[in-house]
């Protein structure tokens, strides 16, 4: 049986693909608080602005390419059972070749019915507009988890963390709960690494690897595959 590696990623793993992190987005969207464009209340107040925000993000995702860190993570499957648990809503892990990706905060390339949340539709183009409806007539919204909404696949993710022999956490400020709390489910026996370009408080039991994802992850993966 192969050893299991859980790779837990946040916005930082996609930063070098040109996608902005949460904090950078706050800068860009200074006219709107992130809570306003990423909450059910914001959607009720001003759905056009929310759709525009995600349409711009989606266009950026479609234009972006996986970077060396995404690709190295995919290569781990040559030797290990790998589960990527990501807070990201982009599809860069999938495009890099990872076969098992759990999106706890949803996926920007999918749309969801506002009235029937189980109705989820893949999107080919960059936009959802006001008036785009599901076949039952309800407005479509991005299939992403907003503040105050239930995070996806938590039980499954806890199980993967608790059965991992290695955990590699990359590019997350660990400020968005409950997803951030998953890192604590790794067993003490697991080798646990935390990658970030700037010193930050890291979870107990994790070893800190300072550097950007593309600088630090590929050599670590080479070592693990050797
Ligand atoms: P965050 O923006 O709060 O934190 C990003 C972290 O990445 C920081 O710790 C930063 O130091 C680090 N970082 C920056 N550049 C890096 C690099 N080159 N290599 C490695 N690390 C780097 O992001 P978060 O913790 O993921 O939480 C924010 C929420 O925003 C998440 O829920 C996520 O869904 C959402 N988000 C997603 C995307 C995306 O899908 N690409 C982008 C932005 C935000």
Image (cartoon, rainbow, N blue to C red):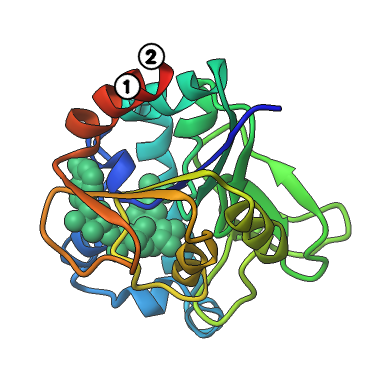
Taking 122 as reference, is 116 left or right?
right
Q: Position of residue 36 (x, y in %)?
A: 39, 79
Q: CA distance from mark 1 to mark 2?
A: 5 Å
- Residue 40 vs residue 210, the one in the foreground: 210
Residue hosting label 1 = 223
Secondary-structure class at tag 1: helix
* Residue 56 makes an appearance in the image: no
Q: Residue at x 63, y 62 (%)?
A: 158
Q: Is residue 121 left or right of residue 128?
A: right
Would you place residue 159 above or below residue 121 in this image?
below
Q: Is residue 223 above or below residue 197?
A: above
Determine which of the numbered discs, if any, sits on residue 193 in the image. none
Residue 191, relative to residue 51: is it above or below?
above
Residue 182 spot, x, y in % from top left: 52, 65
Q: Quadrant of the N terminus?
A: top right
Which one is nearer the viewer's eye here, 110 or 132? 110
The x, y position of residue 74, in whole percent, is 48, 24
Q: Which residue is mark 2?
A: 226
Which residue is farthest right? Answer: 136
Front in this rendered view, residue 101 or 83: 83
Q: Secondary structure at mark 2?
A: loop
Q: Quadrant of ligand 1?
A: bottom left
Image point (35%, 38%), residue name? 60
168 or 105, nearer to the observer: 168
| Residue occupying the far front of the picture | 189
Count of numbered circles in the view: 2
Question: Could you tell me which residue is drawn at 86 percent across and 52 percent down?
Answer: 135
Q: Residue at x 64, y 34 (%)?
A: 100
Residues marked 1 and 2 touching at CB (< 8 Å)? yes
Screen quadrant of the C terminus: top left
Residue 132 appears at what percent x and percent y? 67, 53
């Amino acid at each position: 049986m192969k050893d299991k590696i859980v790779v837990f990623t946040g916005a930082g793993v996609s930063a070098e693909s040109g996608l902005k992190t949460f904090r950078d987005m706050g800068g860009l969207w200074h006219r709107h608080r992130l809570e306003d464009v990423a909450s059910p209340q914001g959607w009720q107040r001003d759905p056009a602005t929310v759709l525009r925000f995600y349409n711009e993000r989606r266009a950026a995702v479609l234009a972006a390419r996986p970077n060396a860190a995404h690709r190295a993570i995919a290569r781990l499957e040559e030797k290990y059972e790998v589960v990527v648990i990501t807070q990201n809503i982009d599809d860069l892990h999938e495009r890099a070749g990872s076969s098992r990706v759990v999106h706890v905060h949803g996926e920007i390339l999918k749309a969801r019915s506002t009235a029937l949340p189980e109705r989820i539709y893949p999107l080919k183009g960059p936009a959802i507009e006001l008036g785009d409806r599901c076949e039952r007539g309800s407005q479509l919204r991005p299939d992403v988890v907003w503040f105050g909404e239930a995070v996806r696949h938590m039980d499954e993710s806890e199980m993967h963390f608790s059965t991992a022999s290695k955990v590699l956490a990359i590019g997350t400020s660990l400020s968005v709960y409950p997803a951030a709390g998953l890192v604590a489910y790794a067993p003490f026996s697991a080798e646990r690494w935390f990658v970030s370009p700037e010193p930050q408080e890291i979870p107990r039991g994790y070893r800190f690897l300072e550097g950007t994802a593309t600088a630090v992850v590929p050599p670590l993966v080479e070592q693990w595959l050797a």
